[in-house]
Amino acid sequence: IRHLQDQYRRALADMENIRQRTKKEVENASDFAITKFAKDLLDTADVLEIALKNVPEAERSSDAHKSLKDFYSGVSMTHGNLLKSLKRFGVEPYAAELGAGAKFDHNLHEAIFRAPVPNKEPGSILEVIKKGYMIKGRVLRNAQVGVVQESN
């Protein structure tokens, strides 16, 4: 009888473990179902951000360039709405402390170039070329960065 009770308890424990594992897999599938789609949208967010950065400040606020000012405003709203939509699904850019000046972390960053820079700590981030994004705490796209190398 003890042997049967032991087998019964083990079977119950196994079933509970399977139930919990399946529940976690279903949650992960639901949380990360949009990963591929979100990754594709990040390119669009990057293009909109580049467009916004390339409009000179003087022309953004000048009434002499009303059509450019209106266009800038529209692109800015589109970019903002895209980021809000991504955030609703758990897609967010990395925190600011992971940007320029931070230590390079191969789990979060992708080094695009290395350059010797006097008075900068080797292995620190010199410039962020493209923001990194996470989805529900998991890296969706590594930040593309330039890294300070040792001066020889």
Image (cartoon, helix red, strand yellow):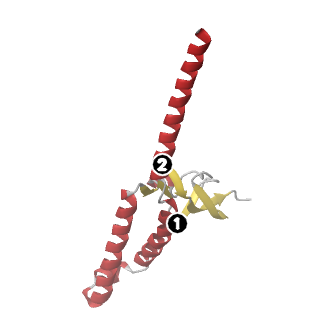
Q: What whole-number distance in Å separates the C-alpha atoms at marks 1 and 2? A: 18 Å
Residue pointed to by mark 1: 130
Residue 32 versus residue 76 in the image, above or below: above
Q: Is residue 101 visible?
A: no
In percent of width and height, residue 19 lies at: 50, 35
In percent of width and height, residue 71 lies at: 32, 83
- Tell which of 14 and 63 is nearer to you: 14
Q: Is residue 27 visible?
A: yes
Q: Which mark is residue 90?
A: none
In which quadrant is the N terminus drawn? top right
- Tag nearer the camera, 1 or 2: 2
Mark nearer the N terminus (1 vs 2): 1
In which quadrant is the C terminus drawn? bottom right
> In the picture provided, is 32 more to the left or to the right than 122?
left
The residue that appears at 50% across and 59% down in the rendered structure is: 35
Amino acid at dot 1 = Lys
The residue that appears at 59% across and 19% down in the rendered structure is: 7
In percent of width and height, residue 52 lies at: 40, 76
In percent of width and height, residue 76 lies at: 34, 74
Residue 117 versus residue 59 in the image, above or below: above
Q: Farthest residue in the top direction?
A: 1
Amino acid at dot 2 = Gly
Residue pointed to by mark 2: 137
Q: Quadrant of residue 141?
A: bottom right
